Structure formats: C-alpha cells, structure tokens
Amino acid sequence: MKQKIEVGVLGATGMVGQHFVKFLQDHPWFDLTWVGASDRSAGKKYRDATSWRLDGVMPAGVAGLTVEDSKPGNAPKLLFSAMDALVATEIERAFAAAGHALVSNSKNHRMEPDVPLLVPEINPDHLKLVPLQKKRGWKGLIATNPNCSTVVLTMGLAPLKPFGITRVVATTMQALSGAGYPGVPSMDINANVIPFIGGEEEKMQQETQKILGDFLGDRVQPLAARVSAHCNRVPVVDGHTVTISVELSSKPTEAAILAAFENFRGVPQERNLPSAPARPVIYMPEKDRPQPRRDAGRERGMAAFVGRVRPCPALDWKFVALGHNTVRGAAGAAVLNAELMLTEGLLA
Ligand code: NAP
C-alpha cells in the first residue's frame, strides 16, 4: 500500500481502546490519527486522559493526540469502536449515518440482521449484508466482531462444519483481562473460579449460530445446531480456554477431524492480510496443551489453538480450544475485519 489510510478509535481511552492503540502501532496499512472518548476526556491529550494499563509504554505517536468528543465531524472514515456498551448504540449509528465505516468490538449491533458478525476466516461472505444497511439511510456502515469467548469456540468449530454440526456443549475458562479494568475483585477470584459471567452464555450461543450460519442472499440463516455454553471466570491473566463436545452428523474419524484442523484456511490467508496468522487453527498434539500462559500469545495472539481431540461418550468428539481474548477476541479481530473490508472495496 503506497499511502496509509487514516483511522480513528472510539473509546480509545478504555481497556479495549488501549489494545487497539497498541495493535495498530506500526500497522502497514492503517495510521491511527484520531482518538475519541467521552466528554470527560475530550480536549485532553491522550497521555493525560488515559491510564495506560498495558505492557510497554504508550505509543509515542498517539500520546500527543488530542482526544475528541465522540460526535461525527473531523474523524477519519474508518473508525474502530471500543466504546462502553451503554453508549455505543446511538453513537455508532450516528457515525454510520454520517458516512463512517464503524468496525465495532461492542456487543450492541452484533445480532442485528443487517450487520455482519465477522470472523474473516469463517464467514467473509456475511459482508454482503452491508448493502442492506442503506435501507436505514446510513451513508456509512457497521460491521462487528464476536464476543471474546465466541471467537474461540467458532474458530474451533469452523473446520468441523463440513461434517454437519448438530449439537455443541462448550465450557469456558475465561481470563481476567476479559472483564476490563479493574475487573473482578482480587478477593473474589484469587485461587477461585466464578461460575457466572453476566449475559455471556446467551451471547456465545446466539453469536455462534450466526457466525456459522449461511448467507442466503438477503439474510443469514443461523446454523441449526443446538449450542449450550457454560461460562466461568478463572484466575488467568490472558487467554480464554474452551472445552468443547460436539455431535457431527457425518460421523468423521479422528484422522478426518485432525486433517480438517490442519487444512483449515480462509480468505485472510489467501490474501495475506497483514494481521492474519499463517494458520488460523493450530492443532497441538501434546496431551496437556494448549495452555493459556504458554500458548495464547503465540502468532501475535491471532490464532486459535486446539488439542486433546478424543471420543466423547455423550456426543461424538471432544477437544480443547484456546485464543487470546483481547487480541483475537477484541482489537486484533476488528483490525483483521477492516483489512478484509478494505480488500473487498468497502472502505473506498
Ligand atoms: P472501558 O475500559 O470502561 O472503556 C470504555 C470507553 O468508552 C472509554 O474510552 C470511555 O471514555 C468511553 N465512553 C464512556 N462513555 C462514553 C460516552 N458517553 N461517549 C463516548 N465514549 C464514552 O471498557 P472496555 O473494557 O474497554 O470495553 C469496551 C467495549 O468493549 C465494551 O462494549 C465491552 O463490552 C467490549 N469488550 C470488552 C472486552 C474486554 O476485554 N474488556 C472484550 C471484548 C469486548 P472515557 O475514558 O472518557 O470515560
């Protein structure tokens, strides 16, 4: 790319916003030139408005930017959104109406029928929903990425879709960083497991059916599989682990399942998108892997790791999947979505 495209981040001062700032540093296509947040932060330099909580120092090129009010005006066309879900609906719509391309990490628009819920390796054709958004009178668009645990589940399941997925039971062990800052009180989570994350199980179930669903010309037909999720918070810093039992109608062999994981590739790999991992799903043969501390950060946090494929006495097969929740489950996912959208001509 001869000239980088200017981009902005809404909610740039928050936890996910900081992950966007970090992930976009030195991006070969995108140049972060605009940061937005609430009117509490607007007018301040980014370095003064933000309590930087990520490893490493705040990128120098962003530290001196002035935080803008989150209203359409001088923002670049392409905006990543990491806003508080309480305010994201109206603000994202206002920017989309004004002609911006909103690539959002917030949950607010994920399940809207005309909004793509994208995992670029799995359902790039769902971008064909975007033209339907013209009916809302928007000059721009909204596309979304999934919840941080859903993306791990769907990347583990997508290679198995050709075998006919009919039932799924998934249990998560979700990292603390997924709860934002300050997150779960240390007295609650130290040496403990909390078997409840509000709204998470419903999101995993519905989002999985939409992501693995088929685009039928004017809508997405959700995957007909029954999906049951159990969500738990565990004392892990980064990396969501999901144990998965799955029923498959064509009854594949173990060798066929391992080959499906091994051979799984998508459009991001074909097009060599800058944030795409060479292999989106990596099978680990060791009997005690993947593990969050050892594996979540590999491949810049953009791959899903699977392991422990074995017969399931209740359904057909069971296995473990792991992904980096703040990278592949948040900022990195949205940046990969934007890279795909750029190559589809949606950001012209
Ligand atoms: P956060 O740390 O509380 O940050 C929220 C951001 O929204 C801040 O930049 C804040 O700006 C901004 N904001 C708040 N009120 C606003 C308003 N009225 N107008 C404009 N901006 C406003 O939250 P977070 O943990 O980063 O989460 C952000 C979003 O990502 C949420 O929708 C969350 O559900 C989703 N998400 C989070 C995670 C995670 O790992 N934490 C993972 C996946 C998805 P100020 O600093 O000025 O208040």
Image: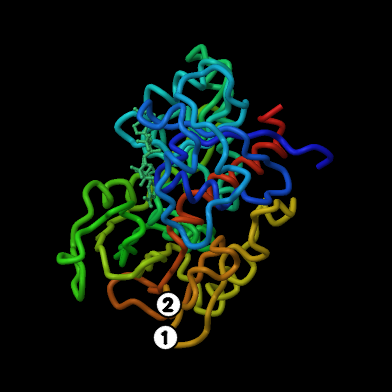
The circle on residue 18 is none
308 up-or-down from 297: above or below: below
User: Tag 1: Cα neighbours inside 10 Å, few (<14), some, or many (≥20)?
Assistant: few
On the image, which quarter does residue 105 sit in?
top left
Looking at the rendering, the quadrant in which ligand 1 lies is top left
Residue 236 position, x and y percent, is: 33, 70
Would you name the residue on which mark 2 appears?
A: 291
As drawn, which residue projects farthest toward the bottom? 287
Q: Residue, x 19% and y 57% (percent of image)?
A: 196
Amino acid at pointer 1: Asp
Please identify the quadrant where the N terminus is shown. top right
Residue 138, percent from left and from top: 53, 16
Q: Give percent across and percent down for residue 267.
A: 68, 50
Residue name at image x 63 percent, y 50 percent: 25
Which of the two residues, 348 or 55, is positioned nearer the viewer here? 55
User: Quick one: 89 or 63, which is closer to the camera?
Assistant: 63
Q: Which mark is nearer the camera, 2 or 1?
A: 2
Circles 2 and 1, Cβ within 8 Å, touching? The answer is: yes
Please report the residue visible at 50 percent of the width from the left and 59 percent of the height from the top: 155
Q: Is residue 75 left or right of residue 294?
A: right
The quadrant in which the C terminus is found is: top right
Describe the element under mark 2 as helix, strand or loop.
loop
Instruction: Give the quarter of the image for residue 240.
Output: bottom left
- Furthest toward the left, the residue is 187
Decide if residue 136 is in sight here.
Answer: yes
Which SS class for mark 1? loop
303 sits to left or right of 181: right
The residue type indicated by label 2 comes to Gln
Label 1 sits on residue? 288
